[in-house]
């Protein structure tokens, strides 16, 4: 147990860290009334996070920089641009598949409505990525490469991407992930062909670690998926939390495919942490009830992009009330949600939809600038269309500028993008979300950072 009067000094220390993260306001959060079952003596009381600020936040709806008909391409390619998607429809990250696929399909529709790329409609071929328990990703990648794609959007899981990145880039094809966050990809020998719109977990880890400290947490327990995604994020969360003056008192790992988590939960609870970071995929559906059933208050729970999901059909009302989670990228704005729902009316989550939409647009724009549909040619122009030019925010506006001979700086639904030479975005937003009584989540704030 600790005195919540320490929360203010913790928040001040967060501000003083100088990691290049600026708090930006967004929509209000919901009730923070804790709701749990079982004995409350098993763990300390919930933390108390800073109240949301008011304001529009980042990533508000942008206005196209040009109007009127899109001029025709000055170059017509011999064959259409083909883009494959390698996104999860099965496995532990399948909940991320629908918004990502909707983002891809929306971008393809808008590009083709504007006349396509290099004189042809863009073609898209979807394949399942599965997860690391299967060989689905390798089979899907083989099929996509066999159909002559220039770029593959995916995978969502860093662990899955590691199984196919050499296969894709070795074939001279771009791999463009909307959701990979493992820092390992920043230095991968990918021949300049691996790109991503999601920022490295160096940023998400800084934001989450410092945010928990700003909530007054002095001690932290962690339950972590033992793969490239989980352990990479764990390292950066721990580093930031300790730099803010906190102490990590328990770190328990589990493996993909595990179904029993009682041992990890018991060991973390025994350490009596003020806050618990749960770094997982859909294993959270099994872990959260174990934690709350043993007295952990939902206000002590901090989720990540792999498990910040709609649990309204999985848990009793109130199970998640006040729990919070982080997801890279800006909040999906209402107009973008409407466009996505027109593509897939069943959408419940919007995680990485913007990053997927941006990935397709950037590939299409780089193809136009390269005047080639070859992956190696397109890759050479991805950095250029993301920075140091006339700001534009969608394919019709940006491609109009390109066809007028102008340099462009594409800013998308996920944020400013701005690629480094290694394919990483150099600046990004991390959204913080708060769970409501119905176990759905709403945005609280956005934090901006540079890497």
Image (cartoon, helix red, strand yellow):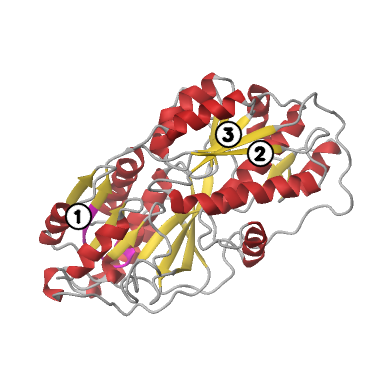
- Tell me, yes or no, if residue 357 can be seen here: no
- How far separated are the C-alphas under marks 2 and 3? 10 Å
Rate crowding at label 1 as few (under 14), some (14 to 19) or many (20 or more) other CA atoms within 10 Å: some
397 or 210, which lies in front?
397
Which residue in the protein does label 3 denote?
Answer: 152
Which residue in the protein does label 2 denote?
Answer: 124
Q: Are marks 1 and 3 in contact (CB under 8 Å)?
A: no
Position in image of residue 85 (x %, y %): 57, 39
Q: Is residue 160 above or below residue 40?
A: above
Position in image of residue 411 (x %, y %): 65, 49
- How far separated are the C-alphas under marks 1 and 3? 41 Å
Which residue in the protein does label 1 denote?
Answer: 247
Helix, strand or loop under label 2? strand
Q: Are marks 2 and 1 in contact (CB under 8 Å)?
A: no
Q: Is residue 332 above or below residue 165?
A: below
Q: Report the side of 294 relative to 23 (left or right).
A: left
Q: Which marked residue is nearer to the observer: mark 2 or mark 1?
A: 2
Q: Are marks 2 and 3 in contact (CB under 8 Å)?
A: no
Q: Earlier in the sequence, mark 2 or mark 1?
A: 2
Q: Residue at x 48, y 73 (%)?
A: 53
- How far separated are the C-alphas under marks 2 and 1? 48 Å
Position in image of residue 346 (x %, y %): 56, 62
Position in image of residue 404 (x %, y %): 86, 38
Rate crowding at label 2 as few (under 14), some (14 to 19) or many (20 or more) other CA atoms within 10 Å: some
Residue 110 part of the magenta-drawn span: no
Residue 228 is marked as none
Helix, strand or loop under label 1? strand
Rate crowding at label 3 as few (under 14), some (14 to 19) or many (20 or more) other CA atoms within 10 Å: many
Helix, strand or loop under label 3? strand
Q: Report the side of 251 relative to 66 (left or right).
A: left
Q: Which marked residue is nearer to the observer: mark 2 or mark 3?
A: 2
Magenta-tinted stretch: 213-222
């Amino acid at each position: 147990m600790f005195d919540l009067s320490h929360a203010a000094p913790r928040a001040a220390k967060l501000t003083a860290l100088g990691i290049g993260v600026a708090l930006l306001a967004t929509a209000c959060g919901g009730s923070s009334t804790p709701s749990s079952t079982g004995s409350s003596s098993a763990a300390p009381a919930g933390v108390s996070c800073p109240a949301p600020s008011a304001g529009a936040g980042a990533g508000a709806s942008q206005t196209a920089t040009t109007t009127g008909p899109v001029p025709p391409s000055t170059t017509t390619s011999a064959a259409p641009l083909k883009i494959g998607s390698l996104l999860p429809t099965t496995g532990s990250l399948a909940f991320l598949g629908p918004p990502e696929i909707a983002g891809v399909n929306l971008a393809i529709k808008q590009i083709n409505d504007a006349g396509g790329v290099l004189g042809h409609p863009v073609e898209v071929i979807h394949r399942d990525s599965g997860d690391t328990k299967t060989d689905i990703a390798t089979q899907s990648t083989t099929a996509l490469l066999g159909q002559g794609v220039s770029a593959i959007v995916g995978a969502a899981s860093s662990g899955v991407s590691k199984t196919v990145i050499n296969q894709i880039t070795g074939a001279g094809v771009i791999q463009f992930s909307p959701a990979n966050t493992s820092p390992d990809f920043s230095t991968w020998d990918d021949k300049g062909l691996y790109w991503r719109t999601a920022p490295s977990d160096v940023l998400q880890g800084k934001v989450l670690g410092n945010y928990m400290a700003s909530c007054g947490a002095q001690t932290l327990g962690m339950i972590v998926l033992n793969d490239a995604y989980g352990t990479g994020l764990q390292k950066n969360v721990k580093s930031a939390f300790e730099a803010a003056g906190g102490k990590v008192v328990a770190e328990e790992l589990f493996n993909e495919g595990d179904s029993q988590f009682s041992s990890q939960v018991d060991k973390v609870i025994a350490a009596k942490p003020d806050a618990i970071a749960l770094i997982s995929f859909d294993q959270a559906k099994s872990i959260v009830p174990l934690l709350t059933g043993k007295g952990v208050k939902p206000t002590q729970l901090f989720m990540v992009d792999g498990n910040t999901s709609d649990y309204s059909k999985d848990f009793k009302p109130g199970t998640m009330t006040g729990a919070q989670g982080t997801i890279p990228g800006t909040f999906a704005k209402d107009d973008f949600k409407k466009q996505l729902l027109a593509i897939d009316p069943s959408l419940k989550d919007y995680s990485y939809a913007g990053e997927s939409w941006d990935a397709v647009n950037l590939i299409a724009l780089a193809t136009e600038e390269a005047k080639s549909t070859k992956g190696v040619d397109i890759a050479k122009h991805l950095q250029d269309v993301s920075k140091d030019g006339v700001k534009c925010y969608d394919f019709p506006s940006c491609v109009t500028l390109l066809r007028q001979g102008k340099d462009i700086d594409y800013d998308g639904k996920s944020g400013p993008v701005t690629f480094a030479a290694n394919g990483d975005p150099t600046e990004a937003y991390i959204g913080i979300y708060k769970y409501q009584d119905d176990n759905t989540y709403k945005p609280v704030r956005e934090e901006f950072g540079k890497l």
